[in-house]
Amino acid sequence: MIGKDQLPEKFRDIINRQVDKFKVRVFTDEVDEIPSVDDIPGESSAKWLKIKDVVCVYVDMKNSTKLSASHHAGTTARSYTLFTGTAIRLFKEFGASYIDIRGDGVFALFNSNKVHAAFASAVTFKTFIQSEFTTRVTNKTSVDTGVHIGIHQATLIVSKIGLRKSASRGDMHNEVWAGKAVNMASKLASLSDNDEIYVSDKYYSNLSSHKALYSCDCNEPVLLWNEVDLTHDDKFSFNTARVLESVWCKQHGAEYLNDILAAD
Ligand SMILES: [Zn+2]
C-alpha cells in the first residue's frame, strides 16, 4: 500500500481504483472474427473478446531514429507520412480488419481466412519500400532506411482501456490487443535488416498457394523461403521461422498477386 506521506491523495486514489479493478475477475468471450471497434468492450466491462488465429503483419521503419536525429525535420515528417500513410492504405485495401500505428511502425490484423491476403500485403509493402521509399528518402537524407517486416498468427484478446473523450479532455482511450500475435510479429520484424519478411512457422504452414511459396517462371522456380533457427533466441515462443527476400516480379507480379489472393 502507498501511504499518505508517500504520494498526494489524488494520485493514490487513481492507483487504488485501478488496483480494485484488478481484483475483479475478467471473462473472455470468444468471437469468430476480429470485432469492429464499436463492438470492443471498455474498461468498465469485466469482459474481453478473444479471437483465434489472428494474422498480424507488423512493419516498421528501418533507422527511423537516425532519420529523426538528423536535422531534417521536414524530411522526417514527409518520410513518416509516406511510410505510415501508405502502409495503412495498402493494408486496408488488402482487407485487414484492424490497423494501428505504433511509433514508427504499423500493424494490421487479418482474420484467419485471409492468410494469403496478409502475405500479399507484406510483399506489396516491401515492393513499395524498395522501389519508391528507400530511394526517395535516402536521396534526401543519406540515411540507410528500409523496412522491418514480421508476420505471426495466434490468439488475441482485446479491450478498450483509458479515458473516453469528454468536455474537459480529448480521447485517451484505445484498443489494447494482448497476446502473442502482435508481440511476436514485432519481434520477428526486428530480425530483418535488408527488408526481408520474417514469419513464424505457424503462419507459414497455412500458406498453401504454390505462388506464395515458389518463385515465378522467369527462371527455374525455387522455394522462396529459407528456414531460420530460433532455438537459442528466448525472445520467441517458437523455434523456427521462415524468411523471404524477394519482391513482386516486374513481369509477373500483378498476375501472381491476384492468384495468391484467390487462394484464401
Ligand atoms: Zn517473373
Image (tube, grey):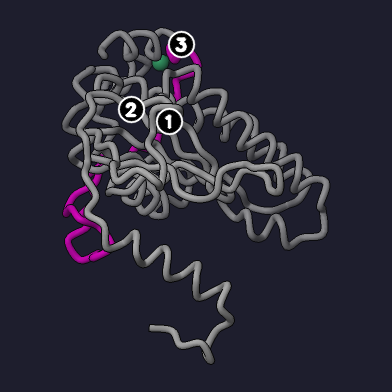
Locate residue 27, reporting x and y percent. 21, 44
The three-letter code of the residue at mark 1 reads Ala
Q: Quadrant of the N terminus?
A: bottom left
Which residue is tagged 1? 122
Q: Is residue 164 magenta?
A: no
SS category of the residue bearing label 3: helix
Locate residue 85, reporting x and y percent. 63, 31
Which numbered circle lies on residue 254?
3
Locate residue 133, reporting x and y percent. 64, 35
State which mark lies toward you, 3 or 1. Answer: 1
Please identify the residue farthest to the bottom as the structure is shown: 5
Q: Is residue 147 visible?
A: no
The residue located at (31%, 50%) in the rendering is 184
Gap between marks 3 and 2 measured at Cα:
28 Å
The residue located at (17%, 61%) in the rendering is 231
What is the crowding at mark 1: few (fewer than 14 residues within 10 Å), some, or many (at least 20)? many
The three-letter code of the residue at mark 3 reads Ala
> From the viewer's perspective, is residue 152 above or below residue 64?
above
Q: Which residues are magenta?
A: 226-253
Q: Earlier in the sequence, mark 3 or mark 1?
A: 1
Which residue is tagged 2? 34
Q: Kindly tell me whether mark 2's CB lies below 8 Å from ligand 1.
A: no
Gap between marks 2 and 1 measured at Cα:
19 Å
Q: Quadrant of the C terminus?
A: top left
